Image (cartoon, grey):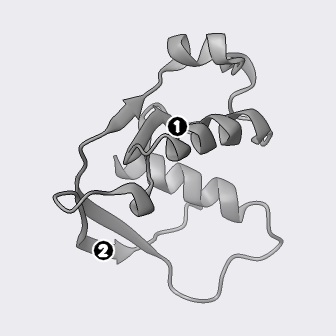
Amino acid sequence: MPEGAIAEFEAFWSLFEQRPDRQALNWKLRVRLERVVELDFQALAPLRVARSNYGERVYSRTQEISDAINYLGYDGLIVPCARYECRNLIIYTQNMAGNCMVEEEDSKEFEWSA
């Protein structure tokens, strides 16, 4: 969902005093993965990740969960987006088997909001 990528991109760059002076691209990818874990807020709660503060920039617990899934050899992880009502896919490229793939399908220049 492009709106989720836009929300994440703008949230990241809002941490800096100045927007980048180079063109930024928003990519559309075609992905085929075999082993993917999906965690929604119901599944994240027992892992000590609360929905109430999910959008805050405190990443230690979510990074631990991601590291464990990567260590177990999964190709990807789907989690809620912290800044838009959609899901994010994290791809562990080092774990991808030969029949998995990530291809660039299209790109367009990122348009900053007002």
Q: On the picture, is 63 further left or further right than 56?
A: left
Q: For the point 16% across and 58% down, which residue is it?
A: 99
Q: Is residue 113 above or below residue 109?
A: above
The part of the image, by quadrant, that contains residue 64 is top right
Check disc 2: other Cα within 10 Å, few if <14, some if 14-19, many if 20+: few
Q: For the point 29% across and 63% down, which residue is it?
A: 28
Q: On the picture, is 7 further left or further right than 108?
A: right
* Image location (x, y in percent) of residue 72: 49, 40
Report helix, strand or loop for mark 2: strand
Labels 1 and 2: the sequence-earlier one: 1
The residue lying toward the viewer, choosing from 42 and 26, is 42
Check disc 1 and report the residue beneath it: 81
* Image location (x, y in percent) of residue 15: 79, 61
Q: For the point 64% across and 88% down, which residue is it?
A: 21
Work out which residue is located at the far front of the displayed protein and give it: 72
Q: How many marks?
A: 2
Residue type highlighted by circle 1 = Cys
Distance from Cα at disc 1 to Cα at disc 2: 21 Å
Work out which residue is located at the far right of the displayed protein and give it: 17
Mark linked to residue 107? 2
